[in-house]
Amino acid sequence: MSRPPLEVADIIRSAGQSFREHSRRWITWQHLKVLDAIMRCRTAVLGGHRDRCADCGHVAISYNSCGNRHCPRCQGNARLRWLRAREAELLPTRYVHAVFTLPRELAPVTLQNKKLIFNLLFRASAETLVEVARDPRHLGAEIGFFSVLHTWNQRLQFHPHVHCILAAGGLSPDHTGWIGSSRRFFLPIKVLGRIFRGKFVAGLKTAFHSGDLHFHGTLQHLAEPRAFRAWLRTLFRQDWVVYAKRPFGGPEHALRYLGAYTHRVAISNQRLVALSDGQVTFRWRDSAHGNKKRLMTLPVDEFLRRFLLHVLPRGFVRIRNFGFLANRRRAKLLPLCFQLLRRSTEDAPPAATASATQPGSCWRCPICGGTMHMEEQISPAELRFRAPPRTVRCAA
């Protein structure tokens, strides 16, 4: 894949020190670390490596990548490695995609309490799915799923939500059978939305009374209990958005969904169109008007401000497993799910090999397509005495 003509790194370089000076009031060391990592990614500053094709012997020298999880250039191989690790865990059944979204009224509080609110979003959405699925009136089963946090919309605005990929069914309460969902329906959306809202608001109250919820600037008045209670009441004036597609295909479709929602950053380099006169133009998809592709132009400082809204707290885990896929239960319950599904009489789609739809590795020879193996690491000092590497698709 050829290098895009414009990258986020180019925008950061164009902004220079002036952006840091103008943003001194709110920018943090973590923001600066992300900007520096993206700007240095796959440049001589980080050194390089020499790769050799195992089939034809072709040799290529490439710059090292920064490895920062917010860098648009470093997520391809991380996604491939994660997908390969998950491939053996895909059950031979249909899957469901659900999305839990926080209302926009919560955005200012979330920006001041990112780690707490994001953890609460994970917990409330997971408990909602597990509780409703366990109810005999709906599914009556113990489900398993993973959730991925996204914090952006197509215009780079702050829009926290979690994507959940679930097997369309679950273990019976006594773990002796597999209970499949309807082909056209998984769980009631309105019930999910109301329970999710109740659990999330209850979590906010607990955090407030324990002193873990903090308010600064224009939100400082919410630190007063009466004002906080009045603000909480506004969250019940509308239904909270929970989206779920009806069950789709088997593991090969699930893998395609996994690849689309796991290792993403706020904007990819492929969406960038132009950088001119201090303005950045990028593509965005207008979901309110039939997913029509549109262009948006922002000043460089505003573009970078929006980009940095989505820097995650240090050490925060943005992909989590729940139910029978939870880390402490997976070794015991996942083999049981495979065993029960093989015995099941459910008319499920045949399980295609997931690798058939898996994207190819970045470690491919540009000459013959063979596997490239790293032979030598090259330091930045050594690179000064070599010609710059060709622009090739290389591993992160």
Image (cartoon, helix red, strand yellow):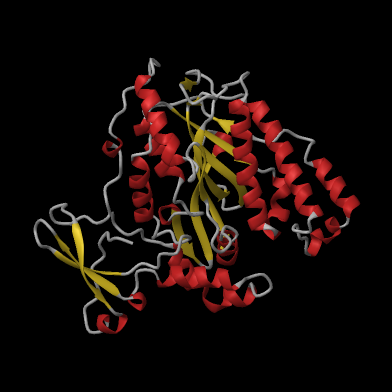
- Residue 132 in which image quadrant: top right
**Residue at left 14%, top 56%?**
367
Q: Give the left or right position of residue 137, taking residue 234 as reference.
A: left
In the rendered structure, the answer to whether residue 393 lies left or right of residue 255 reads left
Residue 14 seen in the figure: yes
Looking at the picture, tell me which residue is in the foreground, 365 or 185: 185
- Please, is residue 36 above or below residue 118 in the view? below
The quadrant in which residue 78 appears is: bottom left
Residue 35: percent from left, percent from top: 50, 69
Q: Nearer the viewer, residue 185 or 144?
A: 144
Left-right relation of 233 to 375? right
Looking at the image, which residue sits at the far right? 226
In the displayed structure, 382 sits above or below 111; it is: below
Point 62% across, 78% down: residue: 21
Image quadrant holding the N terminus, namely: bottom left
Could you tell me if residue 242 is visible in this image? Answer: no
Q: Residue furthest left?
A: 56
Name the residue at 40% across, 61% down. Answer: 6
Q: Quadrant of residue 253?
A: top left
Residue 350: horizontal and vertical position, in percent? Answer: 31, 23
Considering only vertical position in the picture, is 346 above or below 334?
above
The picture places residue 15, in percent across and down from the top left corner, at: 52, 72
Task: Tell me the quarter of the image containing the C terminus.
Answer: bottom left
